[in-house]
Amino acid sequence: MARTPFIAGNWKMHKTVADAEDYIQALLPLVSSIDGVDVAICVPFTDLQAMVDSTRGSRVEVFAQNMHEAEKGAFTGEVTAAMLTEIDVHGVVLGHSERREYYNETDRALAQKLVSALDAGLHPILCVGETEQERERGDTERKLRHQVQEGLERLTAQQIAQITIAYEPIWAIGTGKVATPDQAQEACAFVRALVGDRAADAADVVRVLYGGSVNAANAAELLALADIDGALVGGASLDAETFSQIVAAAVAS
Ligand code: 13P
């Protein structure tokens, strides 16, 4: 089954609204004629409204980088799925390793966040990946199995088919140390097989992205791999020209 490639730029905690407006004015003409690939920018909360307005009618979707699983409540500093859909945000990154590590995001909370996001009509990208020590110990598959199984626990087969999963080895994030094609393909194929264990039909349609030091020079090789359907790009997504080259690589490969 042919899956449409998906390139998402995760800005993390970068860009004021003014920076974001400059960026999107530069990006839109660069990607407007690249067909056959879905494109998203995952931006800080304060940039969401401006980016939704500036991308309306374009091919670029706007994602948040986190949300709370509850419908409302006393959770200072958090936002709900409905708050995101109210301003026409398309999707949300869930369980990024930085949120798991620095903000104690748990698989249990993520399982509920996926349900809440889908119920609200958001497209979730669930992030999974092993640390360097886990890879060295031979525990990569164990970690991925745990994160995927727990994350998908509350979803129906139909809901599983609607999500995207990003495999981001933690040792490759922001380090310039990209996974080898063999490592990336093997892990993404394993993630897809785990999806298949829960929902056989979904395994063919769920997009599995690779993330971790993707740049304009290495994107084509990674994106050509059988089980890699796109990329979640951090640092290299901050420059519109570089990000557009990665978007173009997804179509060429
Ligand atoms: P880098 O591309 O900067 O390594 O970051 C990857 C990432 O964490 C995307 O979510």
Image (cartoon, helix red, strand yellow):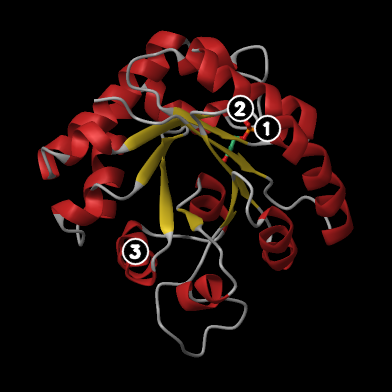
Name the residue: 54% across, 55% down. Answer: 99
The quadrant in which residue 76 appears is bottom right
Judging depth in this view, the residue of 94 and 230 nearest the camera is 230
Q: Which mark is residue 34?
A: 2
Q: Quadrant of ligand 1?
A: top right
Residue where numbered disc 3 is placed: 118
Q: Is residue 87 left or right of residue 137?
A: right
First in sequence, mark 1 or 3: give its number.
Answer: 1
| Image vertical order of residue 84 relative to residue 129, above or below | below
Mark 1 lies on a secondary structure that is helix
Query: Within 10 Å of the Cα at label 2, are there few (<14), some (14-19), or many (20+) other Cα atoms?
Result: some
Residue 1 or 15: which is nearer the viewer? 1
Q: Could you tell me how far apart the alpha carbons at marks 3 and 2 are, in whole angstroms?
A: 28 Å
How far apart marks 1 and 3 lie (CA) works out to: 27 Å
Q: Give the x, y percent position of residue 44.
A: 69, 59
Q: What kind of residue is marked 3? A: Leu
Report how many numbered discs are placed on residues in the image: 3
Q: Can you tell which of label 1 and label 3 is closer to the viewer?
A: 1
| Residue under the point 45% across and 60% down | 105
The amino acid at mark 1 is: Val
Above or below for 237 versus 43: above
| Mark 1 lies on residue | 31
